[in-house]
Amino acid sequence: MRIELTLQDLTRVRLASEADPLAELVSSLQILQRRDAGSALFNRWRHRVRLGLGESASVLLWLCRPYTPIPPFLVPDTDEGGLEAGLAEIARTDSVCLKSALRDLPANRELPAWAAGLPDGDTAGLPKLVQALQDYFDLSLAPGWEPARAQVDADHGMRAQLLVHDGVDAVLTSLRPLVRWASPVLEVVDGIVGSCGAGGTGLVLSPTYFAVCPVIVPATAETPVRLLYPSVRQAAPSTAYGRDVRRSPDTALADLLGPTRAAALAVLAVGCSTSELAARLGVTPSAVSKHATVLRRAGLITTERDRNAVLHSLTPLGSALLEA
């Protein structure tokens, strides 16, 4: 998917202020239905959640299919954050917005009676939809919400520093390799063919724990495009989503790769150039190039040239190794 940004849009690029429960919820519903290698680190979580899903989950899975833009009304842009405020906003969705958001979804004759009228703009089913969203959050996300939110906050802090010191261009470039920025187009590697514009409403960047590829929430007349992108995987205690930690991830990585390459892998979680990586590691650019060659041959990073800079980013395998 290509997102075309005008000059007005670029002046309105911003980071989401905090982890968004509904953004995590809709992204996790897509991961629940994926079976690709990139989503393998969620296998334990996926198994546990599937065992507890209720009948209403079929509606949520239909609304949030993989490789499809998320219906905007499911991720409202509210002044007050949090799950409760977001669900209340969903409950207030009007008929026109509801019908517009669901017009491109495939027909599903197996929907329960309360949800059958949603594609036609029938808002009578919204209270049950809100309850289904709440039940799913309690089952799938609530058990590990605080550690997962800390992961998102860490990514937010790094991108915010980049925005302050180097500007919007640097932030958009840092989203490589799954998001490619070549002004005025942001190309998102999400398996969707097409393009959309922000219409001057801007772009909100939302780091998301439950994401293995970028997820687009299209703009509406009142809200900007939202880009939910995979947050950096920090070495951290178990998130209670099925991961068992038996030893320090930093120590384990250093044993496997060597201390400098392990440190390089952690730094590259947000992507950077050869010179930036050398400065952060305290080594020479030539030494960084040698370490990067080893990591690239192992399939842990990718390297691309962007004008006069050489940019390094983690591959899905590299991200999974940091999370292991």
Image (cartoon, rainbow, N blue to C red):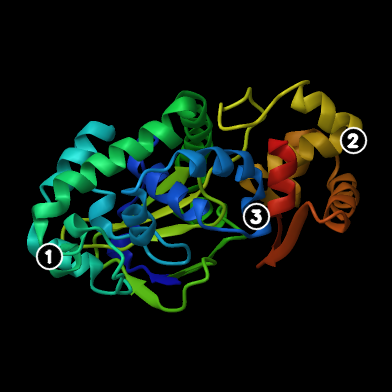
Q: Residue 157: where, in percent of width, then height?
A: 49, 33
Q: Residue at x 23, y 65 (%)?
A: 101
Q: Quadrant of the C terminus?
A: top right
Q: Nearer the viewer, residue 17 or 41?
A: 41
Q: Nearer the viewer, residue 300 or 288?
A: 300
Q: Residue at x 43, y 51 (%)?
A: 29
Dot 2 lies on which element?
helix
Q: Residue at x 10, y 47 (%)?
A: 92
The span from disc 2 to disc 1 (Cα, nearest Å) is 55 Å
Query: In the picture, residue 80 is in which quadrant?
Result: top left
Which residue is disc 2 drawn over?
256
Which residue is disc 1 drawn over?
121
Residue 51 in view? yes
Dot 1 lies on which element?
loop
Query: In the picture, residue 180 is in which quadrant?
Result: bottom right
The span from disc 2 to disc 3 (Cα, nearest Å) is 21 Å
Q: Quadrant of the N terminus?
A: bottom left
Indicate which disc residue 38 carries.
3
Dot 3 lies on which element?
helix
